[in-house]
Image (spheres, helix red, strand yellow):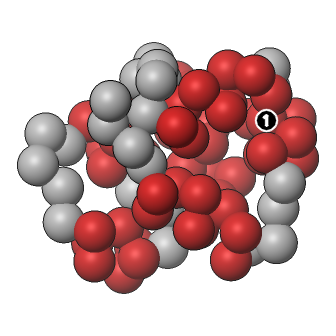
Amino acid sequence: MNSRKWLKTIRIEKGMTQQRVSERANIERSYYTMIEQGKRTPSVKVAKDIAEVLGFDWTIFFETKCNEMKHFQTA
């Protein structure tokens, strides 16, 4: 499983709940939760929508080896 602690950290720093992010990204909260936990990989459209809501580069979702610091620098 590819945990996305960086995604949770960005969301919390923005003061948003999973419910709020999912509403703004037009997806189900349960789907967002699975994405944040690393259980699901979002489609390109969903990745772009989540990234727009939280303010980071959507391509981070698709990097095979990611640098945690990059996630925080793009936020």
* Residue at (67, 33) in percent of width and height: 33
Q: Which residue is mark 1?
A: 22
Residue beneath the point at 67% across and 21% down:
31
Task: Please tell me whether residue 37 is drawn above or below residue 28 in the rendered image.
Answer: below
Q: How many marks?
A: 1
- Which of the 4 image quarters holds residue 14? bottom right
6 relative position to 25: left or right: left
Asked whether, in this view, residue 44 is left or right of residue 25, the answer is: left
x and y, in percent, of residue 40 in the image? 46, 20
**Which residue of the protein is positioned furthest toward the left in this rendering?**
65
Q: Position of residue 27 (x, y in %)?
A: 76, 22
- Is 5 above or below relative to 1? below
Q: How crowded is the residue under tag 1: few (<14 C-alpha within 10 Å), some, or many (20+)?
A: many
- Check the image and report above or below for 31 versus 23: above
Q: Position of residue 30 (x, y in %)?
A: 75, 22
Instruction: Determine the image quadrant of residue 34.
Output: top right
Residue 19 placement, left or right of 52: right
Q: Residue at x 46, y 24 (%)?
A: 39
Q: Is residue 24 visible?
A: no
- SS of the residue under disc 1: helix
Asked if residue 30 can be seen in this view, the reply is yes
